[in-house]
Amino acid sequence: MRLWDLESRTQIAELPHDAPVRVAAQSPDGRWLATITASSWTRIGQQPVRLWSLSTRQLVGVIATNDWPRELMQFSPDNRLLACEDQYKGIHLLNLETRQETALLPAGWNLIYPIGFAFAPQERSLAHCPDRSGVILLGDIASATNRSSLRGHTDMVTALAFSPDGRRLASGSMDRTLRLWDMRRRAETLTLTNQAKMIWSLVFSPDGQTLAVVDDTEQVKLLDAATGAVRNELRGHLDLGAAQK
């Protein structure tokens, strides 16, 4: 994996791996980078979750082994936890200080696509979809319990994203709808139908006014986060399957 300086457009480091990197995530404070490599003939399924220091550009350690990883991994907003998904067990929450797993959120389905998951930005809570019922569970990280749920989707939710202020949640599902939710009222505020079958990723802009949608049409759509109107479409990619934030 190569690290680049965006201003000078030059490579500043290279992090060695023994196989192609399948998924990577950077912590919000810029201190850590986590990576998971793709399966190889010598190690099928069992993939290490590597933690790198971005200040020294050195491997800090292997903090877990992920069984058949899915293409989604996130750090919590407070930089204390790392969430990663596997194909059979669900979503693992790893404590970066102790390097131990603190919780396992059971979730899964028989396809290799992502499972919808997102950390809330301003509180120690999270949202995820456990199965093809389409229900979105809202959980408390400290107690590892579900506090409430959002119902409306009729198939697996593959992408979730909170707005920067935490007041809204966007969800994309295999039922070909994209929905926006008011988190204070726990109510659906907008439904966009006839979407692509697979929505890989959802990202709000820093001001919360634009929602980027990555789907299997090989383009990135920029939507008005209030009305759902398409503001722009970014074309040119040939494969957006592993696209994340």
Image (cartoon, grey):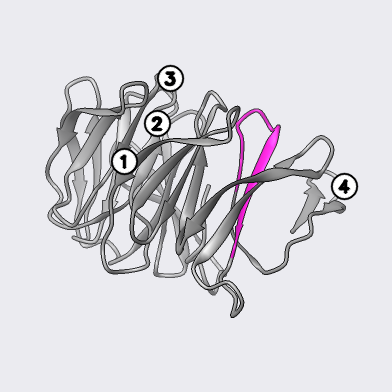
First-in-chain label (3 vs 2): 3
Instruction: Tell me which label, 4 or 3, sits earlier in the chain.
Output: 4
Q: Are marks 2 and 1 in contact (CB under 8 Å)?
A: yes
- What type is the residue that disc 4 sits on? Ser
Nearer-N-terminus badge (3/1): 3
Label 1: element kind:
strand
Lower sequence index among marks 4 and 1? 4
For badge 2, the amino acid type reads: Ser
The crowding category of the residue bearing disc 1, from other C-alpha atoms within 10 Å (few below 14, some 14 to 19, many at least 20), is: many
Lower position in the chain sequence, tag 2 or tag 1 = 2
Name the residue at 53% across, 23% down: 78
Amino acid on which disc 3 is placed: Gln
Name the residue rendered at 39%, 28% in the picture.
120
Q: In this figure, which residue is indicated by the disc labeled 4?
A: 8
Mark 3 lies on residue:
122
| Contact, mark 2 vs mark 4 (Cβ under 8 Å) | no
Q: Which residue is mark 1?
A: 170
Find the distance from the CA under tag 3 to the CA under tag 2.
10 Å
Q: CA distance from mark 4 to mark 3?
A: 33 Å
The CA span between labels 2 and 1 is 8 Å
